[in-house]
Amino acid sequence: MNIKITGKDLKVTDSIKEYVEKKLERVQKYFDEELEVAVTIKKQRELQIAEIRVNTNIDIYKAVTEHKDLYASIDKDIDILEGQIRKTKAKKEKQIRQDTIKDKESAISKNETEIENEILKTSYYEMKPMAPEDAKIKLEEENNLFFTFVNIETNKVNVLFKLKDGKNYGLIEPEL
């Protein structure tokens, strides 16, 4: 972090420099890149004014406060800058999330328009004769929406499925 401290009508002491550098560490933690920071301190009548400008590669953050105590003014500036940075970062993250959702939706809509009314997947499995109660247990184990089996009692292909209530089951059995 490159810090330039300028004093107008006020001498910049080593303790002020150290204090500013220490406080600016709170701002640096939000960035991976090198920051350019310009700090101007000045005195107007009995008020101490601190102006801090933080330049990143993308954004510029600025805070100006006045207080009777210079250190309190610097603290206020740091609080303001942190708030600005958090707000900007939150906006950017939200925008990125919205952009990725839009990209996914457009990709889905492209896929939907390209392929229609086609069988896209075929699954093969062995059907064993079993009772509907056994099929219910198998359906739960595999955590599927339906299960096809040969009913041991009727020797016909049946489909067992979970009803929308999530507690009960339906059984499809062909009539021949």
Image: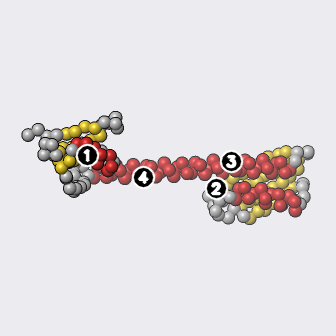
Question: Separation of disc 3 and disc 1 at Cα?
Answer: 61 Å
Residue type indicated by callout 2 = Asp
Question: Separation of disc 3 and disc 4 at Cα?
Answer: 30 Å
* Image quarter of the C terminus: top left
Residue 83: mark in rendering: 3
Which structural element holds mark 3? Answer: helix
Residue tagged by mark 1?
Answer: 134
Measured as percent of width and height from the top left, residue 85 is found at 66, 51
The relative height of residue 20 versus residue 157 in the rendered view (above or below) is: below
Residue 137 can be seen in this image: yes
Precedes in sequence: disc 2 or disc 4: 2
Quarter residue 59 falls in: bottom right
- Mark 3: few, some, or many residues within 10 Å (few <14, many ≥20)? few
- Mark 2: few, some, or many residues within 10 Å (few <14, many ≥20)? few
Residue tagged by mark 4?
Answer: 103
Residue 67: mark in rendering: none
Residue tagged by mark 2?
Answer: 59
Q: Is residue 57 left or right of residue 50?
A: left
User: Would you say the residues marked 2 and 3 are in contact, meaning their CB atoms lie under 8 Å apart?
Assistant: no
* Image quarter of the N terminus: bottom right
Front tag of 2 and 4:
4
Residue type indicated by callout 3 = Gly
